[in-house]
Image (cartoon, grey):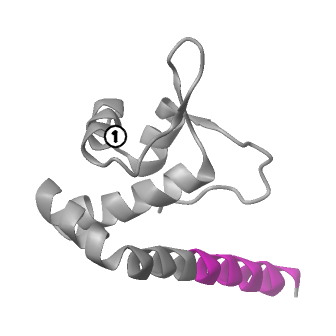
Amino acid sequence: MIEIDENSLKRYYSIGEVAKLFEISTSQIRFWESEFNTLSPVKNSKGDRRFTPANIQQLKLIFELVKEKGYTIAGAKQELATKSSYYKKKVETIDKLKKIKSSLLDMIEDL
C-alpha cells in the first residue's frame, strides 16, 4: 500500500507526491501537520513543504492510527505519546518484511 522506492535517490517528496502515496488529500496532510507537532516537513523559500523519508514514516504512524484504526486526533496523539517507539518499530518491521517479500518474489521470477 504505502511504499517508497528504496532505490530512489530522492531525499524530499512534495506534498502532492505524499498525498498520492497515502491516497488522501493535501489538505488532510496539512491538517495533520498542524495537529501533530512531530510531523514537521522542511519548507523551501517559497513555503512549499518537502517531506523526508522520516516524515513519511511519521505519517505512516498517524495514518495507521487515524484512518485504519479509527482513532480520534486526540486519541492518536495520546497513543503516539505513550507508545511511540512501539509503533515506530512496528512500521520498520513491516517495511523490512515487504522488502523481503519483494526479494523472494523476484527470486521466484528468476527461476
The percent coordinates of residue 16 (x first, y second) are 48, 31
Q: Quadrant of the C terminus?
A: bottom right
The percent coordinates of residue 3 (x first, y second) are 57, 60
Q: Which residue is mark 1?
A: 33
Residue 72 in view (yes/no): no
Between 22 and 29, the residue placed more toward the observer is: 29
Q: Is residue 91 magenta?
A: no
Say whether residue 16 is left or right of residue 24. right
Q: Is residue 109 magenta?
A: yes
Say whether residue 32 is left or right of residue 107. left
Q: Residue at x 27, y 76 (%)?
A: 82
Q: What amino acid is labelled 1 in the image?
A: Glu
Q: Residue at x 32, y 78 (%)?
A: 83
Residue 66 in view (yes/no): yes
Q: Is residue 45 above or below residue 7?
A: above
Say whether residue 71 is left or right of residue 7. left
Between 105 and 73, the residue placed more toward the observer is: 73
Q: Is residue 81 above or below residue 96?
A: above
Q: Residue at x 74, y 86 (%)?
A: 104
The percent coordinates of residue 66 (x first, y second) are 22, 60
The percent coordinates of residue 85 (x first, y second) are 43, 78
Find the magenta span and give its range: 95-110
Secondary structure category for the residue under label 1: helix
Q: Main secondary structure of the magenta part?
A: helix
Between 7 and 41, the residue placed more toward the observer is: 41
Q: Residues within 10 Å of mark 1 (few under 14, many from 20)?
A: some
Between 56 and 82, the residue placed more toward the observer is: 82
Q: State the image quarter where residue 6 is shown.
A: bottom right
